[in-house]
Image (cartoon, rainbow, N blue to C red):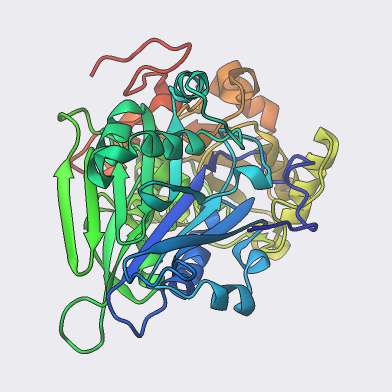
Amino acid sequence: MLLPSPNNLSGLFPEIDCDKLHEACGVLGIYCTDPQKDAASLVYYGLFSLQHRGQESAGIAAVQPSPGSGGKNEHTIECRRGMGLVGDVFNGEILSQLKSSAALGHVRYSTAGSSSIENAQPFVSHFKLGSIAVAHNGTLTNADVVRELLEDAGVGFTSSSDREVIIHLIAKNDKKGLEKALTDTIKFIKGSYALVVLTGDALVGARDPNGIRPLCLGKIDSGNGEKSGGWVLTSESCAIDAVGGSFVRDIEPGELVIIRENEVFSFTFSEKTRRAVCAFEYVYFARPDSVIDSVDVYGSRVRAGGILGRESAVKADLVIGVPDSGIPAAIGYGRATATPFGLGIVKSKYVGRTFIAPSQIMRERAVSVKYNVIESEVRGKRVVIIDDSIVRGTTSRRLVLILKTAGAREVHIRVCSPPVRFPCYFGIDTPHRKDLISNMNNASELCMSLGADSLAFISVEGLLESLDGDGTYCLGCFTGEYPIPVPGEKPSTP
């Protein structure tokens, strides 16, 4: 069932957050083995902790007994989707209709496919294997080719999302059984994906061979000290915490896991490839209380700030962070340079994607609605302001202006990611290259354009040092070198 939200205008107007890169979505699947637990309600609570990954639409699919089937193994899957935030789409009545032992949830920010109810996830299909629901985070680089092949074979599509490609491929291979249908589908698609699939008797997760998009496994406590009360597959570990579970491990790149009853089966579906986790997960996308591929997100941001201080310190009276992800980096910068840390900037939590800003002038004015300065903290001081990234420059320019209007004597910008010069093809909403301000200007020109007294970015080497992991990372939006071939770009060397 589709649940429209008339109050959400994000498909009609550019959002106030246009100066940030945006994650495509968050996925969450729960399989309960404890009959006292309701998977749909747990998914509902878990989706709140993933809301930062997508605010356009939300959906929950849940396994239900087939009406009048009489067979204990015959199930169907019911789904409720709507435009807007999780709290706008769902209420107690809807959740009571979805009560289930297994459920799948999704929050979306559109990258592939328009912002519309037809493209909201999860997608559900009913075919010979039974009912199946799919939720996906990422972007398929060969989606157009696969869609054309399927349409030539007589398959009809109801949306423009590449997620529907996945569910039709699974249906096409249904005679082979679930495991073979899934592995054949996964081997056929290219690009980035954290994929969670719900069937009548199983919860399945898969991560792309390069591990570009995150996916992890958690366990729900049964409360009696015996076997697990259930299992969780999700984009971030913070969602496991939100449902009262415990983190088990990350799903490895190229790994497929199948959860049935109280067992987790795992196998690798691809040859060993270059690990390339999206570096922006740590810079901005992920919640600071998450751990991705053994790297503590909060700790990586603090380290990035410290490295930024080491690479480009400037004499100042105060360091402040742009809320929210710039604050840990500002703490790290302050520690490294012995600069006092302060709040300085207040962010309104109630200005989101529905804020109407239909022109560039209104978008720039909207920054003043979202951010305001604590004048008593900055007046007469030399201020260093730490941000996670600069995309179009709208936010940075306005922040410099309101800081100086509030009496800051100097404003120095430090950025804890390298300049964003190239688009992303793997599930991040990136402006065209011409709209990326760092692609059009060097640091000196950009500093002058923003009205700052100085500007510096962390180096690529410094960012990698801050991640302090044993894997490699996708740095395509910084370097133009991508881990897999993408349309219109030259493939990078491994």
Q: Is residue 264 above or below residue 459?
A: below
Q: Residue furthest bottom?
A: 224
In which image quadrant can residue 320 be found?
Answer: bottom right
> In the image, is 247 to the left or to the right of 404?
left
The N terminus: image quadrant: bottom right
> In the image, is 140 to the left or to the right of 71?
right
The C terminus: image quadrant: top left
Q: What residue do we see at 48% from left, 35% from top?
A: 427
Nearest the eye: 380 or 361: 361
Percent position of residue 469, x then y: 22, 44
Percent position of residue 255, x then y: 21, 43
Percent position of residue 115, x then y: 67, 41
Nearest the eye: 227 or 69: 69
Nearest the eye: 437 or 98: 98
Percent position of residue 285, x then y: 47, 48
Nearest the eye: 176 or 489: 176
In which image quadrant can residue 51 be found?
Answer: bottom right
Q: What residue do we see at 52% from left, 24% from top?
A: 154
Residue 420 visible in the picture: yes
Q: What residue do we see at 35% from left, 54% from top?
A: 297
Residue 417 visible in the picture: no
Q: Is residue 374 above or below residue 166?
A: below
